[in-house]
Amino acid sequence: MSYASETRRRRTFAIISHPDAGKTTLTEKLLLFSGAIQIAGAVKGRKASRHATSDWMEIEKQRGISVASSVMQMSYRDHVINLLDTPGHKDFSEDTYRVLTAVDSALMVIDAANGVEAQTRRLIEVCRQRDTPIITFVNKMDREVRDPLDILDEVERELGMPCCPITWPVGQGKSFGGIINLRTQTMTVFTPGSDRGPKDFEVVPLAEADRLRKRFGQPFDDALESMELAVGASAAWNHEDFLAGKLTPVFFGSGVNNFGVMEVLDAVVDMSPPPGPRISTLLVNKQPVVKTVQPEDKGFAGVVFKVQANMDANHRDRIAFVRVASGRYQPGMKLKVQRTGKELRPTSVVTFMSQRREAVEEAYAGDIIGFTTHGGVQLGDTITDGANLQFTGLPFFAPELFMTVILKNPLRTKQLQQGLAQLGEEGAIQVFKPDVGGPMLLGAVGQLQFEVVQHRLRAEYDADVRLEGCQYTGARWITANSPAELRAFTDAYPMRLSHDAANALAFLCTSPYDVRLAQERFPEIQFHPLREHA
Ligand code: GDP
């Protein structure tokens, strides 16, 4: 097969939801129905990730779980489907943003009783910024839930885009009779239970309305009526609009009962886009030039969107998760990390087959592969088989929480430095080294990140630290148009400057006014709340 036909049959998507909406359950059923796993219950371990508390054991468990199952590959209907999980806890939202840069579409799971919840809202924002196409699955129809018209209304409002129902529920809770497929004009009859295969549900044509009415009573008529209203009020299906992130198809079902799941899996294949082009900068005569990388381009290129340390403290290796952007990966290839120009010599290269890791035989655009290394790879790094390019768009957000790191045993300074450098590279936390010296600063978006880092410094680097509050409440990355302008600025604020793990200059603030004042004083300096990997 050519590269183009290989990439065309790939689908890479993230599954997003508010905790408890049924993401884990749905993931498991998708794996089950694609044949990637044989028995239900295999994904159960991931549940613990929800209960992220300050308990150390939980943090450890959570890390283990996220390594094991944050990326899953399956094949279905001659397509290769890559499913990426997004961390459930809001304190790890930075990780989630980065995962969303690695996918071509998203599957949003909402609980039909609760509608669009807080955490889903944040994820939607990111998808919207990137115009990521979103498929909506309304879960738990077997419970007493909200009116489906209400739910559509809310999804439209929250997403800021029209909904297009593809299936429609008949009844709910105790009276849940099944779903009507608007396209095929058939009703799939609901039967509770979790051992049913996708083809085991009875399908009745809507043409046999009398029979259905007799069987399901009033809920059937109500469903026809509300379906008509919904179809009248919502957008007609338009594939282009969906691909442009301007319309979401909506499905109803019950994940735990295997119901309505097949429809979603088919939608991923039929509706979701294959890998698209990605923007990078290419160095030509040392000058960056924008280059669009096409998935079927011959040269191999990929971007590191996640770095995860080995769970086993005796091994200092890490897995760099790479989203392939173009070309083909094959074992034994010579690859280079573009930031350093150094050859990448992984100890292993793996793919993530549902619950297992396996050696990669080949990978194409859209696939996620994991390079196990002893360092030398950072979040945001571009890896190619030659071309001198760097992908853009992997975001780092200015932290809003800061702590000072105090080492309890000064003899462990080296270990502390090594630990902070590595954890900074992983993106577990942001590390700032004040230009004037003194203790290092940790910057986080969520409080739990501090606890994880403190714990890991002790467990993996034998560096016991105390974290103390400090006056900072924000940071801005600084750029200037000329060295002279930059010098004038750095001379004015020597006490406020620091460098982060990627050696980027940052201005530390103690209040929002700080930035405003500094900006007024130095209008030519740029203060960035977000840094993209250079
Ligand atoms: P996650 O936190 O989004 O991953 O949610 P889970 O998949 O762990 O599901 C949360 C709870 O909802 C679990 O107790 C599930 O068994 C339950 N659940 C998931 N899907 C359904 C469904 O369709 N109907 C009902 N009644 N419960 C469900």
Image (tube, rainbow, N blue to C red):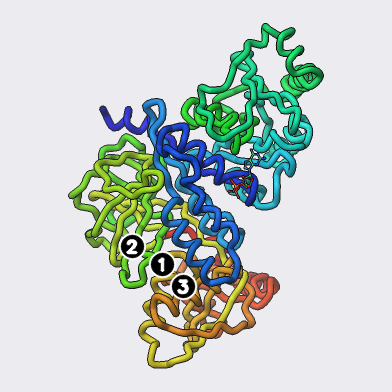
Residue 411 falls left or right of residue 330: right
Q: Dot 2 corresponds to which residue?
A: 377
Foreground tag (3 vs 1) = 1
- Please, is residue 130 above or below residue 526 in the view? above
| Residues at circles 3 and 1 in contact by the CB criterion of under 8 Å | no
User: Does residue 275 appear in this view?
Assistant: no
The residue at 74%/33% (across/down) is 173
Query: Quadrant location of the C terminus?
Result: bottom left
Q: Give the amino acid type for the residue marked by disc 3 in the picture.
A: Asp
- Please, is residue 350 above or below residue 462 in the view? above
Q: In which quarter of the view is residue 475 placed?
A: bottom right
Residue 61 location, x and y as percent?
Answer: 49, 63
Say whether disc 3 or disc 1 marks the residue closer to the N-terminus. 1
Q: Dot 3 corresponds to which residue?
A: 500
Q: Dot 1 corresponds to which residue?
A: 425
Q: CA distance from mark 3 to mark 1?
A: 10 Å
Q: Give the amino acid type for the residue marked by disc 1 in the picture.
A: Glu
